[in-house]
Amino acid sequence: MNKLPSSEHIKSLGTDLGFQQVGITTTSLEEDEKHLVNWLKQGRHGEMSYMRRHGNKRSRPNELVPGTISVISVRMDYLPPSSKHPMQVLNNNELGYVSRYAMGRDYHKIMRQRLQKLATKIEDHYGEFGYRCFVDSAPVLEKALARNAGLGWIGKHSNLINPKTGSWFFLGELYTDLPLESDKPFTEQHCGTCNACIDICPTKAIVAPMQVDARRCISYLTIELRGSIPEEYRKMIGNRVYGCDDCQLICPWNKFSKNTEEDDFRVRNGLDAPTLIELFAWTEADFLKNTEGSAIRRIGYECWSRNIAVGLGNAPNTNRTIEALRSRENDPSTMVREHVSWALTQHTVESS
């Protein structure tokens, strides 16, 4: 270390690299650890076994990365410009809704590369130091750390909200052994009496303010869950084929949100308003080609097909919808066949 690092200079380096905001905090997360332990005890993590696997490392940064004393927290806007308005897609059940964060390139790669550049710039100025970059890729309580770093408060939907830019942004962290001056935590919660996100959740997954039961959450059901989607939620899912943004769409703070300036987050392959029939016609080769470099690819073709089958079950009862479903009645995947069968049953019931 050539000289003592400046927190303000480091934050300036981060914004120069394209992060919309950079904050710094300590590793203290005692209260958040209590909430995490309670959430896990209630089984609200569903089949996300990795949430439990790492023990307390998620809430104790210095155990995950020994020597960590400061955390640099960053955020980057992702709402793509020139895309179909989300409500236009959700209100047209012939279309498939893809969560707006997945419109472009995989944010994990973009953010991690940018964090690595920040670490390199810090080394250029201050000499070698210990660090690790994280972007939703390890046991990290990213929203709690961002709140403690002054980037916003955790809303009733459990997402981070910034009073000037809403919640349409990604978070990333740089765990460091640098003795940095911390920012003032965001201790006030500005949701007030508003319960819009709780009320609008299609599956009532927000069971209480800042308490989400992942087992009911559409993002979990369409992305994290690898087996069959419970029948009780299939009608509620509607045309959401990858994730869900309802709680953010209704949040009044998002009137302040800003579109991203990152070209990598712009819409690719028409995924802002694709038709369900078009998506269901994709072969596995089509899926791999059209999701290359995208976060969507990680769920795989089978789960992608499962999700779209559910969407088609909720689509208009037309000959084209039924023909699309029947084209895959003998799909090689048992799971896809099950969801196709359910979808066809919905149209049979509707016709009778």
Image (tube, rainbow, N blue to C red):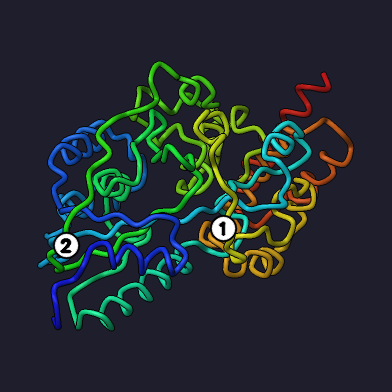
Of callouts 1 and 2, the N-terminal one: 2
Label 2 element class: loop
Q: Quadrant of residue 68?
A: bottom left
Query: Comparing marks 1 and 2, which lies closer to the viewer?
Result: 2
Q: Residues within 10 Å of mark 2 (few under 14, many from 20)?
A: many
Q: Looking at the picture, tell me which residue is in the foreground, 244 or 168.
A: 168
Which residue appears at 74% of the width and 51% of the height? 328
Residue 170 horizontal/vertical position (percent): 45, 53
Residue type indicated by callout 2: Leu
Q: Quadrant of the C terminus?
A: top right
Q: Is residue 49 visible?
A: no
Which residue appears at 52% of the width and 56% of the height? 299
Q: Looking at the picture, tell me which residue is in the foreground, 305 or 240.
A: 240
As drawn, is 162 to the left or to the right of 318? left
Which residue appears at 73% of the width and 53% of the height? 279
Question: Where 167 falls versus 132 (above or below)?
Answer: above
Q: Quadrant of residue 91?
A: top right
Residue 179 horizontal/vertical position (percent): 12, 65
The residue that label 2 is drawn on is 180
Q: Residues within 10 Å of mark 1 (few under 14, many from 20)?
A: many
As drawn, is 124 to the left or to the right of 206? left
As drawn, is 237 to the left or to the right of 188? right
The residue that label 1 is drawn on is 296
Residue 128 horizontal/vertical position (percent): 19, 82
> Which residue sits furthest top?
193
Q: Looking at the picture, tell me which residue is in the foreground, 189 or 300.
A: 189
- Disc tally is 2
Label 1 element class: helix
Q: Is residue 134 visible?
A: yes
* Contact? badges 1 and 2 (CB < 8 Å): no
Residue type indicated by callout 1: Ile
Question: Where 16 falls versus 3 (above or below)?
Answer: above
